[in-house]
Image: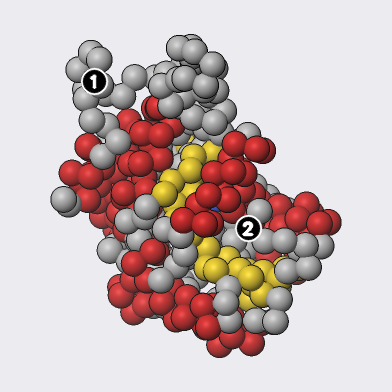
């Protein structure tokens, strides 16, 4: 079956008792049991819920994985995945990730004696050099949030596996339509379903997909024991969202390319970060391991004042955190999504005060470009240096 067919049908088989073509929202906390120890496979809703199982099967199939576990947020999914690492063990991490990911690692998990080293994973040699005898995981984001650095999934997986470490990839920016990391040897995929998988900016969630049965049993055990589960209604929203994932990603990708090309030609824009641009340092790699380039574009307008002008002059684009919804969102990583990253590191990565990030929606491409054009035109000459 093709991707779009799986997206519509897997996990969403018509309900056996009524024929309902959408999976019902099983809004219950518990299940009646016939007798002591005799039940229908469902005991308590933290442990099992049919709506959650449906979305877990659906997204696992889309990623080409055997097991899926849905969580209350992307961060909860990442936190549960990190429970595969124990005190005294070491993790190599992409040095640019979503700010909340490095905050979880540095401010919480480091207190439990887990060691983290951050390297530029776009060069696999940096990963190789960072591996230590106690390295148990390599955690990558590709393309990264927000400066779109691309990591070679195949090469990094080979290096990590030689050292006996698992590879985890945060695939939020691409969605399984545009990138399926398990195909390249990655062990575990995580997503913030809040973004493209839900796709409608109306629910927060996360999911973990993997093939290894032992690790899957552990993630399932953590999901039930720590309990950060995705609610039945939010599960249903993600299931509703993935049905149109293929169509939406085609449009995000088409407009993403057009917006990046427009920004590259604009005199007020100093730098564009988009793996689809031939000038992107890992453009060739992105072509090899992605099925498109997607709808996330970042660009630098040189100063906080210029960025403020753009962010406050747009009309169609909405100034907001988050991404991956049908509506275009525009944001300022340095003060919003990456405020928890220290200033020196932000500067080094290119997350400057002049950096603006757009999540292009599925509105008409020309309307999005016209809105950005009029906002960029409002940048005063004085702001430019
Ligand atoms: O917000 P939550 O569902 O918990 O997902 C966290 C997360 C994980 N991974 C990536 C790559 C992300 O981008 C995010 C959340 N990002 C934003 C809120 C944002 O605006 O970038």
x 37%, y 52%: residue? 66
Residue 209 vs residue 226: left or right? left
Task: Give how far across and how far down residue 138 sits, in percent.
Answer: 58, 70
SS at circle 1:
loop
Q: Is residue 273 visible?
A: no
Given residues 236 and 333, the one toward you in this image is 236
Mark 1 and mark 2: Cα distance apart in space = 37 Å
Closer to the N terminus: mark 1 or mark 2? 1
Task: Give how far across and how far down residue 201 sits, in percent.
Answer: 45, 33
Q: Count every numbered label the image shows and give the total.
A: 2
What colouring method underlies this structural image?
secondary structure
Residues at badges 1 and 2 in contact (C-beta under 8 Å)? no
Local crowd size for mark 2, using a 10 Å CA cut-off: few (<14), some (14–19), many (≥20): some
Residue bearing the label numbered 2: 84
Local crowd size for mark 1, using a 10 Å CA cut-off: few (<14), some (14–19), many (≥20): few
Residue bearing the label numbered 1: 16
As drawn, the label of residue 122 is none
Given residues 27 and 285, the one toward you in this image is 27
Q: Is residue 195 above or below residue 277?
A: above
Task: Give how far across and how far down residue 288 sits, in percent.
Answer: 30, 75
Q: Quarter-wise, where is residue 55 in the image?
A: top left
Respond yes or no on whether mark 2 lies under 8 Å from ligand 1: no
């Amino acid at each position: 079956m093709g991707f779009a067919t799986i997206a519509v049908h897997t996990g969403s088989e018509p309900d056996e008792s009524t024929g309902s073509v959408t999976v019902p929202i099983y809004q219950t906390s518990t299940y009646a049991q016939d007798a002591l120890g005799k039940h229908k496979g469902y005991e308590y809703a933290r442990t099992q819920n049919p709506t959650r199982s449906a979305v877990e099967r659906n997204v696992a199939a889309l990623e080409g994985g055997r097991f899926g576990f849905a969580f209350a947020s992307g961060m909860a999914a990442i936190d549960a995945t990190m429970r595969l690492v124990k005190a005294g063990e070491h993790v190599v991490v992409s040095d640019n990730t979503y700010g909340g990911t490095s905050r979880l690692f540095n401010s919480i998990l480091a207190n439990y004696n887990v060691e983290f080293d951050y390297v530029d994973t776009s060069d696999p040699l940096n990963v190789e050099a960072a591996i230590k005898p106690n390295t148990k995981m390599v955690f990558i984001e590709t393309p990264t949030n927000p400066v779109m650095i691309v990591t070679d999934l195949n090469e990094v997986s080979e290096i990590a596996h030689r050292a006996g470490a698992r590879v985890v990839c945060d695939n939020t920016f691409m969605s399984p339509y545009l990138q399926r990391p398990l195909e390249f040897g990655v062990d575990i995929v995580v997503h913030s379903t809040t973004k493209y998988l839900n796709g409608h900016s109306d629910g927060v969630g996360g999911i973990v997909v993997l093939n290894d049965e032992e690790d899957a049993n552990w993630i399932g055990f953590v999901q039930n024991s720590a309990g950060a589960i995705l609610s039945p209604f939010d599960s249903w929203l993600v299931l509703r969202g993935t049905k149109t994932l293929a169509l939406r990603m085609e449009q995000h990708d088409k407009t993403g390319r057009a917006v990046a090309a427009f920004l590259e030609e604009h005199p007020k824009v100093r730098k564009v970060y988009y793996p689809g641009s031939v000038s992107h340092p890992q453009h060739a790699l992105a072509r090899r391991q992605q099925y498109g380039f997607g709808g996330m574009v970042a660009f630098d307008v040189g100063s906080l004042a210029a960025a403020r002008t753009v962010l406050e002059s747009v009309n169609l684009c909405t100034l907001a955190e988050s991404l991956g919804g049908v509506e275009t969102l525009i944001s300022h990583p340095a003060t919003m999504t990456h405020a928890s990253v220290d200033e020196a590191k932000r500067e080094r990565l290119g997350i400057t005060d002049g950096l603006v990030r757009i999540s292009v929606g599925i509105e008409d491409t020309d309307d999005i470009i016209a809105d950005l054009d009029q906002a960029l035109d409002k940048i005063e000459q004085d702001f430019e240096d």
